[in-house]
């Protein structure tokens, strides 16, 4: 072994010396290629060109063309050869390309290219070490991302960035951050910490930046201290502080997950396990409990990241046991939701959770145990994940996973779950799966179960065979047993069976080992049995082939390709592929004797059967071809002579058939089989050359189309088989002679894997004889065909040599097949077409990977018979035929289409095999994932997988195109294709256009220059193009459907300058198709347009890197480098100048066309759209264009006006005045920040607060004030420097005369100083396009903002009268226009002087007051938006007058409820924009609204709830710290100060008596219906923002099955309940008063008036609206004062059986439902939990049964949501359990029944254990004695109807104690709850409990009803698995169950 290792090292060193460097990471599959010996030489030449030209392209400053081209070649080089270059060069490439991202205003195509190549270069992170080898500057990509995604230019469409680029840049940041310097963490925090403000959008952007950029990879303590230790605790406290799941929480989760996974063992996460599990449980949004409305009140946590964080805690001593305990309890709690009968949105959520959790464990195990190329920090051994932990997770997941196996909604995901489980512990998964598979195979009623099991096995056998030896004994029975799955009536099951067979064939060599047993005496008993079982292989193969042939016979006859049959046809196509592949792979693994037998069987079958349908025929022929590849010589000898003779005989019998002659079925059968045999190939085919030529000659004599097609296919297959490289071998073991020995023990090689270097491949490599045979076929069949076509070209119509249409098509078809089979070996012309070239100093001559040229015989064969010019000669012949047809027979469409295809073959422009290659690569990827096993060594694969990868490598080289070859022949082909693209026939145009597009992709980039003028000529009115030419030209410009690179844009200024004006000048056509096509092209231009730059300057760093590299290489001297730089400067200057000229020319042309010609309305809008796209930040738009856009604001067309508004709004941005500012330090501003940072109001940010007494209402105050408009500034911490504007007297002048304006500004000034223009413009804005669908337009606001920002109040006098008129108008459109204008005006007045602001205030405030008075319900939203725009991003002191105005409006009397609610809406919107900086105003609002809590109007109360929730929004204690200066209103104080107003609600006479449900009429209730006894749960419902503002809420109620899907938990002995504790508690705490007795919470029986009650209800409604609104807006939505409201909420909560005056109040009912749901789903802190449980205990002791029954649904949801928190507080949990158990004995049936449901849920969640103590309690409660006589009477009267039942119940009740009955019923409910807590499983304790409950079946009501209902549910939920579950019961118990569950026969 040591000698071998030494030898390999010496070989590697020798090879490194030959290459000149040591390769880093090569592609190992190159050594398997048939031409592997020339790979090194080829790669060395390619690499030398790439590194030189890439560097020179940077120095020569041709980034757009040269650098993109050569970086693409570098990417291509890596695909071909891997990272086959030295590390120093690798680092240089990364640094060079990364530095180019610093180009100012870098354009999108360059960004896309650079990002893609850099991603490839740093993909293998183990090659480049962090810190030691490479450090990347984070600011480069940060600036790029900020510019592309978050800049104002991007938001205003001055910078158009496609979504794909945005996605790429985000992904690129994540890739690069591994190489960010850990020392940069502090700089990042300083940059983004000041953005932290939870009320502002900057919180989202800052958390996004933090998550994406912050480095978390640390290899030492120093790095940890410099990186994540600076922020970990701080950010974790932020996360813990929020409870309502804001959108930015997910960013923190992503960051913490990454931190945890990259620093396992270095962080103690124990304090965060419970909060994380709690929030993930909430994210599932499961329909739990019996609340009548449940809502999704928080954003979901990203499941993958949450699981990654949790899994990173495993293995660590402090957290591992806690995580495991929580995970096990969680899985048990949600287990029933995985069952197939439960379906809903949650299925995918919880399935994803399980998958990601397991997948992250798999990743950890691989990284810690098997990864040999890791770049991650080492995980300390003490913190590595252990086998016991993996086993615990698998056992917890296993029940859910096997439930999901049969769930069709999550079927595909569950296959991945089982696959991961199997990779982790196959011994825990495979036995149960095998058992289920064999059980399902015997089931006739559940075919899906069998299919699901087979599919799962297909993905799981690979690792199981190697790591779980016991599975091997099942494989052969499994193969035999799965054969019935090949069912013609169930194609999906058939495909699943084929997949399983294929999987087994990859793993198992089907060699009989029974005879080898005698040679191996040390075999175990299992191995001996397995060897003997291998004798069944031959039988399996025989049965498998028989079933496949039977399946083929049942294939449908050919049908129509209509939409109804299409799915079935697709299924049959997939089936055909599977059957061909499966039969071939089975035979490849079989013994030679079996192969011979099967081939003979196929031959016999083929000679005795005949199929008509194409599907059956092609399937059988495919099987023959696939099986023939196993033994070509034997197959050829068996099939070819017979079928060739049969074909020849048929042809001789039909010497001269008619042209429409239909070939016979036998002939079609024979030819199809021969064609498939041609694809088998190998050199053995050469021996049948003459016979095959004779067959082709015979077929061609038939002279019919099908015959020529068949002959072409035979010849094509024959030639390709002789010339191509391919592999027929598909064995799972390397060929070896020992496999044929008797003593070979094949079972030792089951599941064998190997590295690529050990694989032995037998490629077919063309020999000289095969080359000659191929060209003999060409010369024998193609040459005569071309000669006949040549005669046709020269002949006159009807003369000698003339051909009919069918004859031409036949000859062209034959030529097409022959040319396609040989074109890939024919050389091209050496001379290049040079009329056009790249406008670049860079050399674009790259390398061309040689395939056939490496063969020794290639040059020799090509030298014969002038074969090197064959390609050109073919072209000349075909071109002549085309011109003949275009002249004389243009209607011969089919022939012309064939010629287009031949053109593609000759020029290699067509995509050819690319679709096949793409499908092959997808298959390989899928195949690779299915056989994945992380235990395998690196690159060790199954042999079949390595074969596929080697073939893919060869195919990739074949399809590679360097885009540098372009000959005169190719140019002529492109010209011909353009001519055909404008043909009068649509099919001709379509085929030629497709080939032309392929040519543009395959040929050099510059070739478009030769063809664009020709195409545009067809759009020139001077040339008077025909409709067909017009349409064809538009299609050529349109390009492929979804391609960004199309000829109308092409991302080049020179293209745009030609095409865009040509489109506008194109002649008008009346044809609708041309109009639609023109519209489609213009829309595509707009849709795919991206900003391309004019001026590009290469950074100095890039030039220095390139120059240094060239000098160090030794090939370039200092003068040579300087010369390159000089060339680059000239090229850059010339290019930028040319682009600028093209830009101005394009703008001028569009403006001229728009002004000078009568464009159609479509082109009119298109021209303006083009100008909009051309507005740029760095180059001003011409004054003519600006004037045109401004004038179009008053155009009659609505579409034109909209584009003009958008354009002028965008134009205002680059025309903005540059106001002067200074960056001031904190010291200069005298700010002393708090250390550590504290969020909220502090002394250092006190100056930002708005105070009435300090408002700047004088000129001196206003001009001396320090305004800062960003609302996030100072909330948390400060930036190092703050941007402060200089005083007003130092700012540029705003109000300017026309003479002071630039030409561009003057163009806008002229139109907006024209009164008539302004009148018309505003009149248009006031027009309503469609009633009810017009909304507030922010583009209008942006337009007015820009006007008043750039020109001051210059235009205000012209707008004043219009605003005054519109404000008093009642029309909605006028009001909306006024709101937009005023909002934009005030927003644009940011830099106005105080005098201007004061004048505006004096004029505008009375108008605003009048506007509010005239407001309508339709315009409330518009004025709300107006006020928000007025104060958005403005210092409250700057807009003090707006805030004061709203404050005054609050206290003004309202003329109507509408005006009152509108004022509140405006205050909410405007004050909400100011966020935390106006506490004084918020106090004023709260103080005013406190006196209005009982307002009589609903809409006022609804809006009050919204305003109050906004006012309390800032009442936060972030990071556990209250603000240093607490100045915000407190919701707790408000509720506690007004709760006394609610006391009348708890008086006994506050409501009429509720309807009672006595025990006597329980039988009249339908217990199977969802009434109050079992209310139907609702699926999670997201509360919309509208509903939170008091609007209507839509609910979605699930079905009855969902109502039964309650959470099932685990048993926890620690939470057991002793009988003694219950009895003692019952004496002390639970002495419930009877109904009607007064309690301390009432007011002593003082009667309550209706006014008192109504006022109390209205106050409570307001409180509920505040609570509901706070759930989504308040980061800490639960307040301790809410606890005090719980009794009132339970009192007013509606039920289905409630009949009170309150129950008719729909508003109250909906508010109560929403409020109860919100409170129940709140996440609680321990101190809040204590208060809440005490209050629950108080309500449970209430005298009102209604309060008690409504409390229980709250407990159900509240306990589940806070499940993990409650488990940590045992005393509180004990109290809750005692409450529920005591309520089981309640005198009201509704209460006891709901308590039973609650108890069942708590058992499911594991809060109560089913153990001996609980069952003893039930037994004790059931021990109350009943009067037997009365019981008999009760039993007898059950048959007499409801009246008799009522009397019997009354009599039985009188004969026993009610207390005893309640206690006995409570015991029965405990037993029922135990049974119902496990609806789909039968735990060990269940049989005894079921039998115990059955004794109470015939007892008095309500016991009897509860027992019957329990058994009804038991039967329903256990029905599906009863065939398994019944064996958990003894035979006697099953008899009893049968009597209970099966209804008696009517006649019995």
Image (cartoon, rainbow, N blue to C red):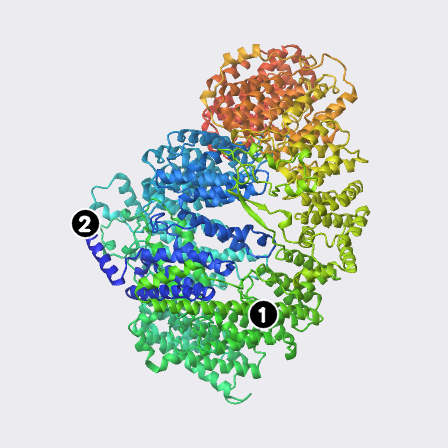
User: So how many labels did they put on this image?
Assistant: 2
From the viewer's perspective, is 473 left or right of 196?
A: left
The numbered dot on residue 2 is 2
Determine whether the residue tagged by mark 1 lies in a helix, strand or loop: helix
Q: Secondary structure at mark 2?
A: helix
Asked whether the beta carbons under mark 1 and mark 2 sit within 8 Å of each other, the answer is no
Describe residue 1297's horizontal placement relative to residue 373 as left or right. Answer: right
* Residue 662 seen from this side: no
In primary-sequence order, the first of circles 1 and 2 is 2
* Image quadrant in which the C terminus is located: top right
Can residue 179 be seen by looking at this rendering?
yes
Disc 2 packing (10 Å; few <14; some 14–19; many ≥20):
few
Image spot of residue 1755 (x, y percent): 58, 25
Which of the 4 quarters of the picture holds residue 1126?
bottom left
The answer to which of 1021 and 810 lies nearer the viewer is: 1021
The location of residue 136, given as percent across then percent down, is 41, 51
Instruction: Check disc 1: other Cα within 10 Å, few if <14, some if 14-19, many if 20+.
Output: many
Can you tell which quarter of the image residue 27 is in?
bottom left
Please state which of the two labelled residues, at mark 1 or mark 2, is closer to the viewer.
1
- Residue 1567 image position (x, y, % from top left): 64, 26
Tell me which residue sits at (68%, 45%) in the image. Answer: 1429
Q: Give above or below for 1529 relative to 183.
A: above
Above or below — where is 1265 with respect to 292?
below
**Which sits in the foreground, 197 or 1566?**
197
Question: Which one is in front, 1786 or 649?
Answer: 1786
Q: Mark on residue 1057?
A: 1
User: Label 1, label 2: how many angstroms apart (C-alpha)?
Assistant: 69 Å
| x and y, in percent, of residue 1608 in the image | 51, 29
């Amino acid at each position: 072994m040591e000698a071998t290792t030494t030898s390999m090292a010496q070989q590697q060193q020798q090879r490194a010396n030959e290459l000149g460097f040591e390769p880093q990471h090569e592609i190992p599959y190159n050594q398997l290629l048939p031409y592997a010996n020339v790979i090194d030489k080829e790669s060395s030449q390619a690499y030398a060109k790439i590194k030189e030209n890439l560097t020179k392209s940077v120095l020569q400053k041709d980034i757009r063309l040269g650098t993109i081209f050569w970086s693409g070649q570098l990417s291509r080089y890596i695909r071909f050869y891997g990272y086959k270059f030295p590390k120093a060069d690798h680092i240089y490439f990364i640094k060079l390309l990364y530095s180019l991202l610093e180009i100012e205003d870098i354009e999108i195509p360059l960004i896309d290219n650079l990002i893609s190549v850099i991603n490839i270069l740093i993909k293998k992170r183990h090659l480049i070490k962090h810190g030691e080898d490479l450090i990347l500057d984070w600011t480069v990509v940060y600036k790029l991302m900020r510019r592309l995604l978050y800049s104002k230019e991007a938001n205003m469409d001055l910078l158009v960035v496609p979504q794909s680029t945005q996605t790429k840049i985000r992904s690129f940041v994540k890739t690069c951050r591994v190489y960010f310097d850990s020392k940069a963490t502090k700089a990042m925090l300083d940059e983004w910490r000041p953005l932290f403000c939870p009320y502002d959008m900057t919180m989202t952007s800052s958390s996004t930046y933090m998550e994406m950029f912050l480095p978390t990879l640390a290899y030492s303590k120093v790095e940890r201290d410099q990186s994540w230790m600076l922020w970990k605790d701080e950010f974790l406290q932020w996360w813990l502080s929020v409870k309502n799941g804001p959108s930015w929480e997910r960013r923190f989760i992503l960051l913490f997950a990454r931190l945890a996974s990259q620093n396992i063992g270095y962080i103690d996460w124990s304090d965060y396990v419970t909060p994380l599990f709690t929030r993930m449980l909430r994210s599932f949004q499961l329909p739990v409990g019996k609340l009548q409305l449940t809502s999704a009140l928080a954003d979901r946590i990203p499941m993958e990241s949450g699981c990654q964080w949790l899994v990173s805690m495993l293995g660590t001593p402090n957290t591992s046991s806690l995580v495991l305990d929580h995970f096990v309890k969680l899985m048990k709690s949600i287990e029933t939701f995985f069952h197939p009968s439960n379906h809903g949105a949650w299925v995918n959520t919880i399935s994803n959770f399980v998958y990601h959790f397991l997948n992250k464990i798999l990743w950890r195990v691989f990284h810690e145990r098997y990864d040999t190329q890791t770049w991650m920090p080492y995980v300390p051994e003490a913190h590595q994940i252990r086998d016991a932990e993996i086993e615990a997770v698998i056992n917890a997941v296993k029940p859910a996973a096997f439930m999901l196996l049969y769930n069709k909604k999550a079927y595909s995901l569950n296959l991945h779950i089982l696959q991961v489980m199997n990779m982790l512990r196959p011994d825990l998964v495979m036995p149960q799966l095998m058992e289920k598979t064999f059980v399902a195979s015997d089931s006739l009623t559940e075919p899906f179960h069998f299919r699901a099991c087979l599919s799962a096995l297909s993905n799981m056998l690979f690792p199981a065979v190697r790591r779980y030896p016991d599975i091997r004994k099942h494989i052969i029975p499994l193969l035999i047993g799965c054969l019935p799955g090949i069912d013609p009536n169930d194609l999906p099951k058939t495909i699943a069976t084929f997949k399983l067979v294929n999987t087994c064939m990859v793993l198992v060599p089907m060699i009989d080992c029974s005879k080898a047993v005698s040679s191996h005496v040390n075999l175990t008993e299992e191995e001996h049995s397995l060897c003997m079982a291998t004798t069944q292989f031959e039988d399996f193969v025989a049965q498998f082939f028989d079933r496949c042939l039977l399946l083929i016979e049942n294939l449908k006859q050919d049908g129509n390709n209509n939409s109804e049959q299409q799915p079935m046809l697709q299924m049959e196509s997939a089936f055909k592929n599977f059957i061909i592949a499966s039969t071939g792979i089975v035979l490849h693994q079989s013994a030679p004797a079996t192969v011979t037998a099967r081939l003979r069987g196929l031959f016999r079958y083929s000679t005795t059967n005949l199929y008509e349908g194409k599907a059956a025929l092609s399937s059988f022929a495919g099987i023959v071809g696939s099986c023939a590849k196993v033994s070509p010589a034997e197959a050829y000898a068996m099939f070819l002579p017979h079928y060739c003779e049969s074909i020849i005989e048929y042809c001789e019998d039909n010497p001269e058939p008619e042209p429409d002659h239909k070939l016979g079925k036998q002939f079609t059968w024979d030819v199809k089989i021969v064609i498939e045999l041609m694809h088998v190939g190998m050199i053995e085919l050469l021996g049948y050359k003459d016979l095959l030529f004779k067959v082709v000659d015979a077929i061609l004599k038939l002279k019919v189309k099908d015959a020529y097609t068949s002959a072409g296919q035979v010849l094509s297959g024959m030639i390709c088989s002789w010339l191509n490289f391919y592999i027929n071998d598909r064995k799972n073991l390397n060929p070896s002679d020992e496999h044929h020995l008797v003593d070979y023990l094949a079972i030792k090689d089951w599941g064998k894997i190997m590295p690529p270097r050990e694989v032995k491949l037998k490629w077919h490599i063309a020999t000289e004889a095969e080359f000659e045979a191929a060209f003999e076929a060409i010369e024998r069949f193609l040459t005569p065909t071309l000669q006949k076509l040549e005669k046709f070209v020269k002949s006159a119509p009807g003369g000698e040599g003339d051909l009919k249409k069918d004859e031409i098509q036949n000859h062209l078809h034959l030529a097409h097949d022959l040319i396609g089979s040989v074109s890939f070996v024919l050389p091209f012309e050496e001379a290049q077409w040079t009329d056009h070239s790249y406008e670049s100093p860079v050399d674009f001559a790259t390398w061309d990977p040689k395939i056939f040229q490496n063969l020794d015989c290639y040059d020799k064969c090509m030298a014969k018979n002038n074969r090197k010019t064959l390609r050109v000669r073919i072209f000349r012949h075909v071109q002549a035929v085309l011109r003949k047809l275009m002249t004389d027979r243009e209607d011969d469409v089919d022939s012309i289409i064939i010629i287009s295809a031949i053109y593609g073959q000759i020029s290699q422009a067509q995509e050819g095999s690319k679709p096949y290659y793409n499908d092959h690569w997808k298959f390989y990827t899928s195949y690779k994932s299915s056989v994945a096993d992380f235990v395998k060594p690196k690159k060790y694969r199954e042999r079949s997988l390595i074969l596929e990868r080697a073939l893919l490598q060869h195919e990739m080289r074949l399809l590679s195109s360097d885009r540098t070859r372009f000959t005169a022949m190719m140019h002529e082909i492109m010209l011909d294709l353009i001519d055909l693209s404008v043909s009068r026939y649509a099919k001709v145009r379509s085929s030629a256009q497709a080939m032309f597009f392929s040519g543009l992709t395959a040929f050099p980039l510059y070739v478009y220059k030769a063809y664009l003028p020709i195409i545009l000529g067809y759009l020139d009115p001077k040339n008077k193009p025909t409709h067909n030419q017009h349409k064809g030209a538009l299609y050529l410009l349109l390009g492929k459907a979804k391609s960004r690179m199309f000829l109308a844009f092409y991302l080049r200024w020179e293209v745009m300058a030609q095409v865009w004006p040509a489109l506008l000048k194109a002649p008008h056509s009346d044809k609708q198709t041309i109009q639609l096509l023109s519209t489609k092209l213009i829309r595509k231009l707009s849709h795919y347009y991206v900003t391309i730059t004019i001026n590009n300057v290469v950074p100095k760093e890039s030039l220095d890197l390139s120059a240094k590299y060239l000098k160090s290489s030794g090939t370039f001297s200092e003068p040579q480098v300087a010369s390159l730089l000089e060339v680059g400067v000239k090229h850059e200057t010339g290019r930028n100048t040319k682009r600028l000229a093209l830009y101005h020319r394009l703008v001028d042309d569009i403006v001229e066309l728009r002004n000078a010609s009568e464009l159609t309305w479509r082109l009119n809008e298109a021209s303006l759209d083009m100008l909009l796209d051309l507005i740029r930040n760095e180059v001003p738009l011409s004054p003519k264009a600006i004037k045109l856009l401004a004038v179009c604001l008053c155009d009659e067309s609505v579409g034109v006006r909209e584009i003009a508004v958008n354009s002028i709004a965008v134009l205002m941005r680059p025309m903005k005045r540059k106001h002067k500012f200074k960056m001031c330090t904190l010291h200069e501003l005298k700010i002393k920040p708090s250390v550590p940072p504290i969020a909220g109001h502090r002394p250092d940010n006190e100056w930002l607060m708005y105070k009435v007494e300090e408002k700047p209402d004088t000129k001196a105050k206003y001009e001396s004030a320090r305004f800062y408009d960003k609302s996030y500034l100072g909330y948390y911490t400060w930036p190092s420097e703050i941007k402060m504007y200089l005083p007003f007297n130092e700012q540029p002048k705003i109000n300017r005369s026309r003479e002071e304006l630039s030409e561009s500004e003057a163009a806008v000034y002229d139109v907006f100083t024209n009164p008539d223009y302004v009148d018309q413009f505003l009149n248009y804005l006031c027009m309503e396009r469609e009633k009810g669908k017009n909304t507030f337009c922010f583009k209008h606001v942006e337009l007015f903002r820009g006007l008043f920002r750039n020109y001051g109040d210059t235009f205000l006098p012209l707008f004043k009268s219009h605003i005054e008129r519109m404000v008093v108008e009642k029309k909605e459109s006028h009001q909306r226009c006024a709101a937009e204008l005023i909002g934009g005006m005030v927003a644009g007045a940011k830099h106005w002087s105080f005098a201007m602001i004061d004048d505006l205030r004096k004029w505008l405030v009375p108008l605003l007051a009048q506007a509010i008075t005239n407001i309508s319900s339709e315009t409330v939203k518009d004025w709300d938006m107006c006020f928000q725009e007025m104060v958005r991003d403005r210092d409250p002191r700057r807009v003090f007058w707006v805030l004061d105005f709203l404050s005054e409006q609050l206290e003004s009397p309202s003329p109507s409820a509408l005006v009152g609610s509108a004022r509140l809406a405006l205050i909410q919107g405007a004050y909400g924009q100011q966020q935390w900086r106006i506490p004084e105003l918020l106090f004023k609002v709260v103080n005013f609204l406190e006196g209005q809590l009982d307002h009589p109007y609903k809409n006022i109360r609804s809006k009050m709830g919204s305003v109050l929730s906004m006012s309390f929004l800032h009442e936060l204690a972030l990071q556990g710290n209250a603000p240093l200066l607490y100045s915000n209103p407190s919701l707790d104080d408000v509720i506690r100060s007004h709760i006394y107003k609610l006391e009348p609600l708890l008086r006994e006479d506050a409501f009429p008596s509720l309807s009672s449900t006595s025990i006597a009429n329980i039988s009249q209730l339908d217990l199977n219906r969802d009434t109050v006894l079992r209310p139907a749960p609702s699926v999670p419902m997201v509360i919309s923002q509208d509903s939170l503002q008091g609007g209507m809420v839509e609910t979605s109620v699930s079905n009855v099955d969902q109502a039964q899907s309650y959470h099932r938990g685990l048993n926890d002995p620690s939470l057991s309940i002793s009988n003694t504790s219950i009895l003692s508690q019952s004496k002390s705490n639970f002495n419930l008063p009877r109904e009607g007795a007064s309690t301390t919470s009432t007011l002593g029986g003082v009667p309550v008036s209706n006014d008192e009650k109504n006022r109390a209800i209205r106050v409570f409604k307001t409180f509920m609206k505040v609570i509901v609104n706070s759930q989504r807006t308040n980061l800490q939505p639960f307040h301790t004062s809410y606890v005090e409201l719980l009794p009132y909420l339970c009192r007013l909560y509606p039920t289905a059986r409630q009949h009170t005056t309150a129950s008719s109040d729909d508003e109250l009912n909906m508010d109560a439902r929403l409020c109860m749901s919100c409170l129940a789903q709140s996440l609680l802190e321990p101190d809040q939990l204590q208060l809440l449980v005490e209050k629950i205990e108080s309500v449970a002791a209430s005298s009102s049964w209604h309060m008690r029954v409504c409390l229980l649904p709250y407990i159900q949801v509240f306990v589940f949501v806070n499940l993990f928190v409650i488990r940590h507080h045992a005393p509180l949990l004990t109290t809750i359990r005692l409450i529920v158990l005591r309520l089981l004995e309640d005198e009201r049936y509704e209460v006891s029944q709901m308590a039973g449901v609650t108890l069942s849920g708590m058992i499911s969640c594991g809060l109560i254990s089913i153990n001996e103590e609980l069952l003893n309690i039930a037994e004790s409660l059931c021990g109350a004695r009943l009067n037997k006589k009365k019981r008999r009477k009760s039993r007898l009267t059950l048959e007499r109807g409801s009246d008799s039942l009522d009397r019997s119940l009354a009599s039985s009740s009188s004969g026993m104690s009610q207390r005893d009955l309640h206690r006995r019923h409570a015991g029965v409910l405990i037993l029922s709850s135990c049974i119902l807590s496990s609806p789909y499983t039968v735990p060990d304790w269940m049989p005894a409990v079921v039998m115990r409950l059955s004794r109470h079946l015939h007892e008095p009501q309500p016991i009897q009803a509860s027992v019957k209902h329990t058994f009804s549910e038991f039967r329903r939920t256990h029905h599906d698995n009863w065939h398994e579950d019944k064996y958990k019961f003894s035979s006697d118990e099953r008899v009893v169950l049968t009597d209970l569950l099966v209804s008696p026969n009517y006649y019995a």
